[in-house]
Amino acid sequence: MDLEKSRQEFIKLQRKLSAINHSIELLFFDGETAAPPKSIANRISTLEIINDKLYNLKFGEETDELMAFLWENKEQLSMVERRSLEVLKRESDRMKGLSKKEFIKYQSLLSSAKDAWHMANEEGDYELFRPYLEQVFDRVRALANSYDSEMNPYDYCLDMHEPGSSSKIYDGIFDGVRRDIVPLLKQIKERPPVDDSCLMGDYSVEKQEALALYIMNLMGLNMDNVGLATSEHPFTRRIGSHFDQRLTTRYSRKDFTFSLYTILFGCGYALADMGQLDELAYTAADGSASFGIMEGQTRFYENILGRSRPFINYIYPKLKSLFPTSIKDSTPEDLYFAINKVDAGPIRMGSDEITNNLHVLVRYELEKDLMNKSLSFTDLPDAWNEKYREYLGVEVKDHTRGVLQDILWADAAIGYFPTAVLGNIYSALMLDKMSSDIDIKECIQNGAIETINKWNHEHVWKHLGLYDSDTIMEKFVGAASLDFAPYINYLKRKYSEIY
């Protein structure tokens, strides 16, 4: 084979894959936002045809030959070409156990599972979802076995979301969560509760949407490349490339903060993703950043920046102008304490900085047991409820606020949840390193978020897609990627003042 011709064929292959993924992502976005509830069969029919083409492009004989030749000559490829090849090869190796028929069937299963989750969540009936959930885990377990029969199947899932990770690494992280955060929550519960009554009011959806757009602009998003919609389970997703970002949120008439912080979470993701090098667009490297580093960005903007005293002070006039009756005579300090209230409730989304780690701990332990078959799907709800009693001291009243609250398992995102705690760790490490270069407090007080964004672009964003998390953290941020201490110190410093 001719190397130059093969490189050109590789470019064409990636453009085709990008186009197909674009259509799949649009169908997903539509299904989660605007599609009628009975339209799932329509999407599955379309996806079966699209996934037939996708399988041929990704795993067909011609692609195998092309990638094998390029792999033999990878030292002669550019950095972007090598990274793109590594990403595609990694996925190909992971999915090698699926025939085309099985691949299409698996993708259809995921669409059906998400639809079943929506119905089960609405009705609070776990049994409507259980058969689909069991099939998804069975399919992923079979893929893990085909990939490496000697490998712990849960490690297969963890490594898929955070390359190089394993249950051994995460066990160490969650030992720290149990050691440091569980007793910290207990101490906080023993203190007088924070008064959050200043947040309670009647907040119109129209005004909350205006706040969302204000925040997106304040954070520095290029709104020509960003869309905003609503969904039951808020998310941020790229469509086709990093040039098209879609944020979703959910508005509560009683409390504007849920929407505010899902938007800030989405801003962190979209800013980082859009900050990648434009030359990555329409290559397999585009958007290949591991989840831990992306979670670190979302947590930085949502929590470390968004829940800080300077940030609340800065947006206070905007809140007063949008919600004059509801905010009433509350001061910025009132809002700062209320927004940072620690509330050990049953719901992960919108949870505070302390308990968020414990919500993830519950999911980590349960999905590990499910993957390793030490827990049955029949017993999952009871196991879920028991862990909430143990770690958060919470009684789960129904399945909607319990085992049915997350859609991610329906999408086979097994092993994703632990990256949230990894992201929390990364966010504190980035805070420490950034603080040595710029005055973050002054930047926030003056609304100069662009200075913070420039630092992130230089140390994180422009390296996304080209490197995995540990390399970015150690080589470009200058921090030991699994140093838990700065995060715990950040939490203790902040919450010892509040409580």
Image (spheres, rainbow, N blue to C red):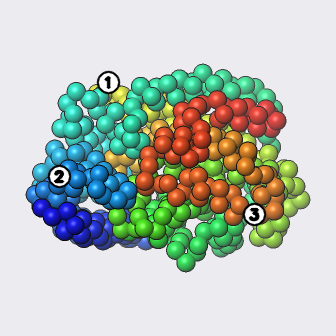
The tag on residue 243 is none
Query: Are the residues flagged by discs 3 and 1 in contact, CB closer than 8 Å?
Result: no
Q: Position of residue 220 (x, y in %)?
A: 65, 67
Residue 307 image point, x, y percent: 72, 50
Task: From the top left corner, tell me how far across and down residue 103 is, in percent.
Answer: 18, 53
- Quarter where residue 453 is shown: bottom right
Q: Of the residues shown, which amino acid type is indicated by label 3? A: Ala
Residue appearing at x 51%, y 51% in the figure: 294
Nearer to us: label 3 or label 1? 3
Q: Residue furthest front?
A: 76
Mark 2 highlights which residue? 68
For this rendering, which residue is in front, 169 or 453?
A: 453
Residue pointed to by mark 3: 448
Using the rendered view, name the quadrant where residue 152 is placed. top left
Query: Dot 3 lies on which element?
Result: loop
Q: Quadrant of the N terminus?
A: bottom left
Q: In the picture, which quadrant includes the C terminus?
A: top right
Q: Is residue 169 above or below residue 72?
A: above
**Around disc 3, counting alpha carbons within 10 Å, would you say few (fewer than 14), some (14 to 19), or many (20 or more)?**
some
Mark 3 or 2 closer to N-term? 2
Alpha carbon separation for disc pair 2 and 1: 39 Å
Report the residue at 23% width, 53% height from top: 73
- Amino acid identity at mark 2: Ala
Eyeballing the image, is 459 above or below 360? Answer: below
**Label 1 secondary element:** loop
Return the residue at label 1: 374
